[in-house]
Image (cartoon, rainbow, N blue to C red):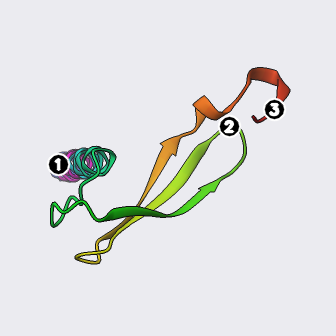
Amino acid sequence: MDFYLLAFMLIILSGSVLVYIYYLKEKKEELDSIRRGFCPKCKHADIELTDQRSGGCSGPQMLTFECLSCGYSNSFAVDSSDSCCGSGGCK
């Protein structure tokens, strides 16, 4: 009985990890499309940055993009390490 429970838990855990990896892959593809200037949903060039938040020099920035054509909206956490100037603080 314990073997079946362990096997079930391993199947659930591995399935959850695979679904999360697939989700991250899709988010990366959407961000790549946005960086090229196109909406990932309707493929029009009407995507714009609507909100940008940061926790300071270190840590990620939260970027929110919205498409003016189809209403697509999504937020992404991107690394903001290029906005720091070492130990002296923010630029």
Name the residue: 57% across, 44% down. Answer: 60
**Closer to us: 24 or 62:** 62
Q: Position of residue 81 (x, y in %)?
A: 60, 31
Q: Categorize mark 1 by other alpha carbons within 10 Å: few (<14), some (14-19), many (20+).
A: few
Which stretch did the figure color magenta?
7-19
Q: Position of residue 79 (x, y in %)?
A: 52, 38
**Dominant secondary structure, magenta:** helix
Please, what secondary structure does the residue beneath circle 3 have?
A: loop
Q: Name the residue under label 2.
A: 58
The amino acid marked with disc number 2 is Ser
Please, what secondary structure does the residue beneath circle 2 have?
A: loop
**Label 2 vs label 1, nearer the camera:** 2
Name the residue: 75% across, 34% down. Answer: 91
**Label 3 vs label 2, nearer the camera:** 3
**Closer to us: 87 or 11:** 87
Q: Categorize mark 2 by other alpha carbons within 10 Å: few (<14), some (14-19), many (20+).
A: some
* Residue that lies at the very extreme toward the top in this rendered image: 86
Q: Name the residue under label 3.
A: 89
Say which quarter of the image contains residue 87. top right
The amino acid marked with disc number 1 is Ile
Residue 83's label in the rendered image is none
Q: Where is residue 41 in the image (x, y as percent from the top left)?
A: 18, 65
* Residue that lies at the very extreme toward the right in this rendered image: 88
Distance from disc 1 to disc 3, alpha carbons, whole Å, reads: 46 Å
